[in-house]
Structures are given as C-alpha cells and as structure tokens.
Image (tube, grey):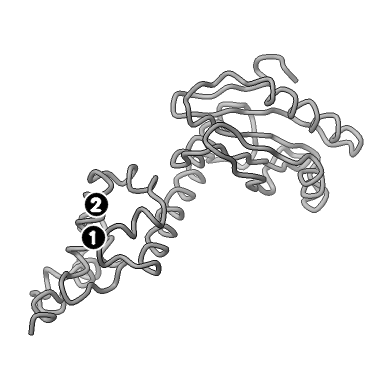
Amino acid sequence: MEARKHSIKSWAKDDRPREKLLSKSPMSLSDAELLALLLNHGNREKSALDLARELMQLGRNNLQELGKLSVFDLMKVKGIGEAKAVTITAALELGRRRQAAMALESPVVNCSRDVALYLQQLFQDHRHEVFVVLFLNRANKIRHSEIISSGGITGTVADPRMIMRKAIEQEAVGLILSHNHPSGNLRPSKADEDLTYKIKEAAKFLDIRVMDHIIVSNEGYFSFADEGLL
C-alpha cells in the first residue's frame, strides 16, 4: 500500500508526466517531470518525480549546473543508482551535443568565431581540460571531431602521432586544434604554444595544414590564427 502511495501510476491521468507529454507536448512538462520520465520509476519511499526534484535541487534547480555533475555526484541522491545516473548523464550529454551542433549551422568553416561558438557549447560543462581536434576536407567542411585527450584541472596532453593517424583515417587535409581553459584565462601557455608547433610540423610531412588552435572558456575564445601565432 505504501509503495502504491508513491507510485505515479496512482496519480490522475492528466498529472502523470508520460500521459501529459503524449496528450500535450514535451514543452508542457517541467524540468523535473522530464527527468522523472528518464528515471522511469521510483522506489518504495519516493516516486520518480520526487527523485527528479531532489536531483534538480542538487543541481541548484538549474539544468546547466546539473549537466556539470558526474555520475557519482548524481548517485548521492538516495534512490539514484548507477543505471539511473548513467541514463541522466547520457541524456544531458545528448542535449549538449545537439546544442553544439546547432551552434555550427554550416558545416563549412569560414572563421574562427564560427568554430569557437561550436566549441564553447561542446566544452561548457567540462571542469577539466579537454583537447579536441576537428578534421576538415578540401572544401573546409568538418568531416569529424574527436576528443583526443582529457586532463586534469590544470592541463591535458595530446599525442601528435595519434592526431596524424586520425587525420589519415579521416582523409583530412586540414586540422583545427582546440582545448578549453576551465580557469577562464584565455592566454595560451608555453606548453600550448610548443604543442601547437609540434603538431604543425608533424602535419607538414603529410601535406596537412593546421588551420588554427582555438582556446575557449565561458569568457570567450583565443585564436592562434587570428593572433598571427601559426
């Protein structure tokens, strides 16, 4: 009887998130109700919506903040196991990737600002440095983007050999290197400059051009190409 008390199935049909989405639209649901659909069910003590509300509180009732939490952070909510936490993390990652894809409306790279906007969306929830390479074809269209490495809060290391191997696999003729600075400081470090030079020199032997290295943060971006550093 107690379990039924906390079950969404016992609610009036119009109040149930699933039926509400089907009869109206996804936009009619609150953030917590959408999360409850991902959770699918609650437990003996709490409904899926109760758990979803606790998750929202953990993220300061802000989806941007919720997206920054790890699987293990989400599991701090009693009733959220690994499976539920992984489902939520995957859904938030899909949302971020969709947002990033929308930011780059054209697959053709025309300027650093276009790429920087895309990268800001891609990196926005990362609290550590991530190194991403965009692989371009002869028409300056992005064929592929890939995370090459993830580091700590203060830095990451990218292997030029791995990047060249990926470039050959993708039949790329141009590369755009990129990484984020979680600290917000956009100035490249000496290590950033040295790594850029090393990758640029390696690419020359394969007739591949390093078109830019873009550093992004929530504050803006820094383009090596715009600053004449390539």
Camera-side residue of 24 and 152: 152
- Side of 18 where 156 appears, left or right: right
Residue picked out by circle 1:
52
Please provide percent x and percent y for residue 78.
Answer: 25, 63
Using the image, determine if residue 210 lies above or below residue 148.
Answer: above
**Nearer-the-camera pick, 87 or 209:** 87
Query: How many discs mark residues in the rendered view?
Result: 2
Question: What x and y, as percent, mark residue 64?
Answer: 34, 43
Residue 4 falls in which quadrant of the image? bottom left
Asked if marks 2 and 1 touch (Cβ < 8 Å), the reply is yes
Q: Is residue 176 above or below residue 99?
A: above
Which of the two residues, 103 or 51, is positioned nearer the viewer here?
A: 51
Mark 1 Cα-neighbour bin, 10 Å: few <14, some 14–19, many ≥20? many
Q: Position of residue 50 (x, y in %)?
A: 17, 63
Please identify the quadrant where the N terminus is shown: bottom left
Identify the residue at image location x=40%, y=69%: 83
Q: Quick check: 209 left or right of 80?
A: right
Query: Dot 2, crowdedness within 10 Å: few (<14), some or many (≥20)?
Result: some
Decide if residue 149 is on the left or right side of residue 120.
right
Residue ranking furthest to the right: 205
Q: Which residue is mark 2?
A: 56
Query: Which amino acid type is marked by label 1?
Result: Ala
